[in-house]
């Protein structure tokens, strides 16, 4: 049986502007959804339905196909089912061999922690005839209440307030996570909705149940990503062609000493210096790219024996030119930053990285979060990751 995943990801969002392009763990939400679906062995194809060019680009970067969603299916009142059916028709029309999807899956990018194994199990259940539709849910033993205008006020929904059972004795409820819904295609076409025939539940861990609809939930997802996900398997850094770093806040602790004459000085880490030397010996070039105009940046870079560009206001533009001049693949470059002016160059490279004490928006954009703060071994930590990955190559 052929299983097709459709990820509806329109450009409009009322709660969080351009939500589907916001990053968790350094990856846009739409890219995370596509990657999770593509990693499920039972899935044959992944299509992102969108009306936004930037989302389409992010989807293709993640390996998904794209279906352009028409305006009448792109408004806030359009149903997810309508987007799925449109994408399904468009995908099937593209199949030169006449292939059709027997199973269709709605995956929502607002759920950033989809486990491919859970999605795979749900798809296999429908494909094997064990269920006609399966949705992701988390088990909860919460005591639910409803506010009323009656004399008693709030009343228990799933319990008698006069009888207080132990939490573990309360019959568990199941809460939809909104992450994925698996359906038989024929049933979806016939009924127009996602719950058809025999409905089964794919239980997922509580930690994977977060759904993003607000800025606060996005901030929570960013924080959870640092706990739930390994920053980066060392093997992923084996192909790195170059490392680019900011200076203040990366090679330094983002502070400075000023004497009575107004002369500034900064503290750097000898450990970071050794990390840079080890990168050079491993054949990995390093560029220091800084907005700071003080000569200390150039002097430190000269001592380290690395390229430097400082006094740079448009860091992304300058970095793009530097990469092009050296014929480097941006997807194989690491950029380490700590503050908002690093977001531009971070978006250009395949491995945006952040020191441990970086600004929240920088941590959110980082694919690799270092455990060390700026000026205190962060550059050395990155160097060891890159070198370890290269040495592990066969």
Image (cartoon, rainbow, N blue to C red):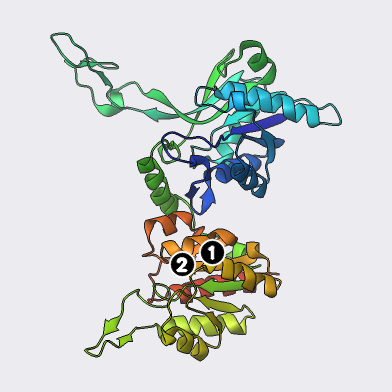
Q: Locate residue 39 relative to residue 153 in the image: left or right.
A: right
Q: Quadrant of residue 148?
A: top left
Q: Which mark is residue 184?
A: none
Q: Report the residue marked by disc 1.
A: 345
- SS state under label 2: strand
Q: Camera-side residue: 339 or 389?
A: 339
* Above-or-below relation of 221 to 177: below
Residue at 65% from the left image edge and 32% from the top image edge = 5
The percent position of residue 311, horizontal first and vertical second, equals 47, 77
Q: Report the residue marked by disc 2.
A: 337
Residue 126 visible? The answer is: no
Pointer 2 or 1: first along the chain? 2
- In this rendering, which labeled residue sits more in front, label 2 or label 1? 1
Q: Locate residue 40 relative to residue 289 in the image: left or right.
A: right
- SS state under label 1: helix
* Above-or-below relation of 189 to 323: above
The percent position of residue 3, horizontal first and vertical second, equals 70, 30
The residue positioned farthest toward the top in the image shown? 150
Residue at 69% from the left image edge and 31% from the top image edge = 4
């Amino acid at each position: 049986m052929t299983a097709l995943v459709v990820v509806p990801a329109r450009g409009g969002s009322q709660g969080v502007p351009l939500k589907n392009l916001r990053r968790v763990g350094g990856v846009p939400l739409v890219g995370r959804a596509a990657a999770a679906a593509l990693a499920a062995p039972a899935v044959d194809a992944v299509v992102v339905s969108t009306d936004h060019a930037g989302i389409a680009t992010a989807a293709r970067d993640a390996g998904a196909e794209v279906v352009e969603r028409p305006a009448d299916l792109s408004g806030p009142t359009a149903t997810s089912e309508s987007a799925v059916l449109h994408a399904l028709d468009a995908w099937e029309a593209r199949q030169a061999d006449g292939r059709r999807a027997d199973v269709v899956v709605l995956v929502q990018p607002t759920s950033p922690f989809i486990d491919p194994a859970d999605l795979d199990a749900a798809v296999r259940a429908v494909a094997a005839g064990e269920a006609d539709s399966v949705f992701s849910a988390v088990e909860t033993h919460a005591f639910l209440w409803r506010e009323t205008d009656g004399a008693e006020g709030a009343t228990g929904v799933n319990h008698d307030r006069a009888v207080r059972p132990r939490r573990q004795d309360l019959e568990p409820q199941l809460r939809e996570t909104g992450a994925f819904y698996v359906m038989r295609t024929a049933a979806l076409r016939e009924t127009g909705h996602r719950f058809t025939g025999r409905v089964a539940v794919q239980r997922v861990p509580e930690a994977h149940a977060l759904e993003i609809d607000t800025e606060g939930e996005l901030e929570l997802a960013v924080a959870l990503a640092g706990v739930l996900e390994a920053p980066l398997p060392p093997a992923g850094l084996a192909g790195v062609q170059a490392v680019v770093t900011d200076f203040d806040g990366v090679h330094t602790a983002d502070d400075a000493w000023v004497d009575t004459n107004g002369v500034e000085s900064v503290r750097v880490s000898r450990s970071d210096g050794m990390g840079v030397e080890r990168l050079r010996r491993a054949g990995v070039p390093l560029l220091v790219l800084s907005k700071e105009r003080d000569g200390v940046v150039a002097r430190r870079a000269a001592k380290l024996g690395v390229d430097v560009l400082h006094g740079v206001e448009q860091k992304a533009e300058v970095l793009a030119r530097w990469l092009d001049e050296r014929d480097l693949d941006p997807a194989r470059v690491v950029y380490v930053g700590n503050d908002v002016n690093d977001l531009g160059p971070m978006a250009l490279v395949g491995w945006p990285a952040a020191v441990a004490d970086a600004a929240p928006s920088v941590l959110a954009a980082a694919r690799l979060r270092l455990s060390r703060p700026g000026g205190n071994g962060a550059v050395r930590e990155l160097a060891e990751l890159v070198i370890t990955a290269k040495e592990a190559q066969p």
